Each structure stands twice: as C-alpha cells, then as structure tokens.
Image (cartoon, rainbow, N blue to C red):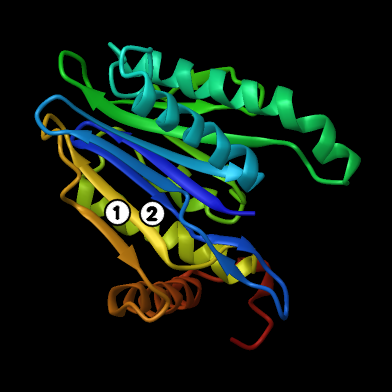
Amino acid sequence: MTYCIGLNLEQGLILASDSRTNAGVDDVRRNGKMRVYVNEGERMIVTLSSGNLSLTQNAVNLLEHRAAHDPQRPGIGNARSMFEVAQHVGDALREIRARDAAYLRDSGVDPSGSFIVGGQIKGEAPRLFLVYSEGNFIESSPETPYFQTGESKFGKPILDRVITPRTSMTEACKCVLVSFDSTMRSNLSVGPPLDLLLYRRDSFNANLKQRLEEDDPYLHTVRTEWNETLRRGVRDLPGPTWLTDLPG
C-alpha cells in the first residue's frame, strides 16, 4: 500500500507520495511513486502511482518507452492538454491490466492500480486528474480541489477541514505533511521517504521538489508540534455540562 496526495490551488499544485511498497516485521521496501516530466517553459507534468507496483510501473514505462522510440506517437511529451495526458496514462494502465491481470489473479495478487496526474501545459491552467484502475478518470474542481490514492482514510480529515482552492502553498504544504504524518502513525504500510513537489502556477519547472527522509528535521518538527497541538486543543475544549460532577 502507499499514500499519494495531489492539490490544485489558485497558486499552483502540490503533489506528494510516500515510498513504501511492502510492510512487515522483517520486510520493508522502498520505491518512489513520483515521476516528473519537464520541458522548461512549455510543460511540467507529474504522475503519482498507488496499487500494484508492477502494473503502475509498467504503465509509465510503456509511455516512456514509446516516447523514446517513437517521438511522434501521442504521449506525455507531446500531448496538447493535461486532459490528453490523463487519457494516455489511463490507456496505458488499461493496456497493462489487459495483459497481466489474469495472471496476477491466478497468483492471488490484486491487479489494480491508480494514478494522480497533475501539471500544466502552456496555454492552459494547471490541472489535476485521478485515473482509476479501469483507465477512466475525473478532474479536480473548486469544490473538490484535492485527490488521494492508496491508504487515504487517516489523512483525509485534515484536508477536508483546511484545504480550499484559496489556501496558500505554504499552509497547504504543512497540511499535506500533517496528513502524511497522521497516516504513517496509524498504518505501517505507509512510510518515508516522502517525495514532495510544489509547483507554482506558470513556472513550468520542478525546482521546488524535496525528498524527506525518516530523520528529516522538518518532518520531525511537524510530528512533534502537531501531536502537542492536538493534545493542547483537547485540553482546552470546554467540558460537557452533564459531566460537571466528574474531576477534571
């Protein structure tokens, strides 16, 4: 399992993913789920993957292989819009599933995967898509400015309470890291390093990309400060009037 987040804000995009692919007392592996495609001044595109690693890796590898050997073939590098990029990712995922799904099921392996696809191509605003395992997809909106994939339930409440399209990049970045910390604290199948990319609207570069390891000082600060903030918040809540006879 993994955890990925994509936010589409007025100031730009934030995309983040963990790097854990397997978890157990004696088997923890790491593999990045973020791939970045940049043509400076023209396009910046990011894919985040969750689910069966062989399916999602093969889907993006298929697109990259075709781009390398047949640059004229439609793909991420020459798509005319982010809508087309989402289509290409969905088509590649559908193609790999059609090839491999039956064999994976025979071995008791879940043949599903999904992508968050975000970026900007010159001539349009930044856009964000969630591509389902079947290859279909949806786009973010002002009412739904973020997507999650993977182990999403533990990190969702903070996003629901804080994120709107008008949230600043700085506040949203803090919120994303709190969401990851909440998830990692409750589920061992999600873990660092975390890949985090902040894309400022119309910049067409990936300069604000960070990898946060387990011992990253700021990640540690988020964890300790958020824990204390929650404890203090609970302490400061007024007690219910019907429990006034109990000691504080």
Cβ–Cβ under 8 Å for marks 1 and 2: yes
x 11%, y 35%: residue: 203
- Looking at the image, residue 168 lies above or below residue 233: above
Amino acid type assigned to the residue bearing label 1 in the image? Cys
Residue with the most extreme bottom position: 247
Q: Name the residue under label 1.
A: 173
Give percent across and percent down for residue 239: 56, 71
Q: Which residue is disc 2 drawn over?
A: 176
Say whether residue 246 is left or right of residue 225.
right
Q: In this view, does 195 lie above or below 98?
A: below
Compared with residue 26, is residue 239 higher up or lower down, i.e. above or below? above
Q: Is residue 65 left or right of residue 44?
A: right
- Res 170 visible: yes
Q: Quadrant of residue 240?
A: bottom right
224 is higher (above) or lower (below) than 37: below
Where disc 1 sits, the SS reads: helix
Image location of residue 206, percent across then percent down: 20, 44
Label 2 crowd (10 A; few <14 / some 14-19 / many >=20): many
Q: What element carries label 2?
A: helix
Res. 125 image quadrant: top left
Cα–Cα span, label 1 and label 2: 5 Å
Quick one: 186 or 52, which is closer to the camera? 52
Left or right position of 178 against 248: left
Of residues 51 and 248, the one drawn nearer to the viewer in this rendering: 51
Q: What residue type is labelled 2?
A: Val
**At 28% across and 17% down in the image, what residue appears?**
78
Query: x%, y% of residue 89?
Result: 49, 24
